[in-house]
Image (cartoon, rainbow, N blue to C red):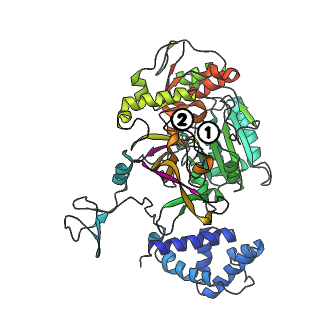
Amino acid sequence: MKLPNKTRGVVRTLLSELATKTNLSVEQILDIHKRCAPSADRFSAHMTYLWATKKSIRRNALIKGIGDAPVAPPDRRFSLLFHLIQEFVINDPRNFWAEDVTISDVKPICTVCSEDMKDSPSGLVCPNGHGGAEIDIDVDHQIEEIFGVKRPDKVSFVNERPNIPWNDQQSKAFKKITAWLNGPRSGQQVFRLFGYAGTGKTSMAREVAALVENGEQGIRKGTVLYAAYTGKAASIMIKNGCAGASTIHSLIYRPKIDGLTGKVTGFTRNDESPLRFARLLILDEVSMVDEEMALDLLSFGVQILVLGDPKQLRPIKGTGYFTSSAPDVMLTDVERVAAENPLIWLATEIRNGRMPRAGRYGDSRIFKPGRAIRDEDIAGADQLIVGMNRTRQALNKRYRMLSGAFDVDSEFPIKGERLMCLRNNKQTGLLNGTQWVCSTPTIKPIRRLKDPKYPTKGSEETNIEGLYFRVLGLDLYDADGNGLILNTSCSTHHFDQNLPEPPWRDIAGTDEYAFAYAGTVHKMQGSQFPFVVGLDESHVFQEQRWEHLYTLFTRASERVHLYQPE
């Protein structure tokens, strides 16, 4: 029997609610169900009792199947849930756990002619009359139709344990990390392993992960997870051998789905996150993590190994929760292989306050002061990075003129353009500094709450025009490695500089964006790109000049073209 999507959603919600209330995992609930299956009353009574009391001793006894816990009057909801579990989860698990398509714009298509199926009184029909044709949901095709770009590749998962000799500094660090991992569970939760570019932080992290996963050197065996603030940084971790690295957002938050429309309406902490069952979490590129996200991570009680670089630009106010404290271990010796990499050599020179001469360094290049940025570099860069906002705006305009987007709309984004989120919105999942591709915007008046203290009083239309569109994530992924797709809106004044800034109350419920082709070093923290074209404006930052330029260089994973002012 096939469970309707809406009913399946109800069962999933009940299971999640039950798991949260009882501090059990879904797997444990199903295991209890199998052992209690002969008596639905016994099952519902036990679970109702645990729901009301959450007594750990009795809960553990029930999990282990030892004796009978005292019972309370059965909860009818969970008596019903018992039968639903038996019918749909146990008997037909593949159908129950199948993922729903959450893109509301995706339409079924005919597999004979590939035309969109049309609604009719008798159901979906092919407009060309292929009556008995099967239908298919071509998500990739629909994403290309909506956003004007091909669906980004899924994040792939590969892993290999490093097989390299460790220097004295790294060996001492391993001893400290091992002692931390073997310490009491109530002890220090976060260990900060900091080091400069090329000192082997990622290789060490992979070795620590192998020690934990194999239970070596007396370390309690368990699962290791990797995460970073953005998808770009997570993909670099994967490339460097950190299997399954994800964004922090996809790891610990889950979408809230509207039961009627199936659309994502926001995000909430996922109490069934894989982090709940992990032994160790390894974080990298987390300078943009704020206190709220950090506390959500820490609430799972898992030990966290944080990788950081203290020579990078200090995070903007309100972020840098994990990187603002002193390191437990500081690596300063650059590995020989890394030192032979021209990009690492350049970054090391700049970190030490020495500006390399103009010239070629492998695939990277530093141009003479005063050289104008070439059009081919603007069009070919994976990311343009500058120091000041007015330079960012000028380069974004120039990129749009080269690409032809400016000729279509000189102010507002068009379908397929790259945008950067400039403000966190935990409810929708948008994070400051993350990049997205937009659909065709619709311009219409922004609505605001009549009374922010009492949302039930409804909303009213303002005289402020807003852009309404959908965004496809380039930095944030779902649990399957696909880019998030969200509905969003912003005020038109973010793109039309001639418009005044509206009253904050009128736009409080909207998001904030800018074109993402060029970005400031501050906004690029936590991300990496294969080919970076930078304009050195570090002189503006005075005492942080070298940190600013060093951060720019370390945003590149393969090569940099650096232009300098006169």
Residue closer to the observer: 366 or 349: 366
Q: In this image, 22 relative to 12: left or right?
A: right
Please tell me whether residue 401 is drawn above or below residue 360 in the rendered image. below
Q: Residue at x 68, y 20 (%)?
A: 542
Indicate which disc, 2 or 1, sits on the residue closer to the N terminus.
1
Quarter of the image holding residue 35? bottom right
Q: Which quadrant of the rendered structure holds the C terminus?
A: top right
As measured in the structure, the alpha-carbon distance from the residue carrying label 2 to the one carrying label 1 is: 9 Å
Q: Residue furthest left?
A: 129
* Residue 528 circle label: 2
Residue type beneath disc 2: Gln
The magenta span reads: 435-448
Residue closer to the observer: 199 or 356: 356
Residue 254, percent from left and from top:
57, 59
Could you tell me if the residues under marks 2 and 1 are in contact, i.e. CB atoms within 8 Å?
yes
Q: Residue at x 62, y 70 (%)?
A: 17
The verdict on residue 440 being magenta is yes
Q: Which residue is mark 1?
A: 285
Please tell me whether residue 354 is drawn above or below residue 449 in the rendered image. above
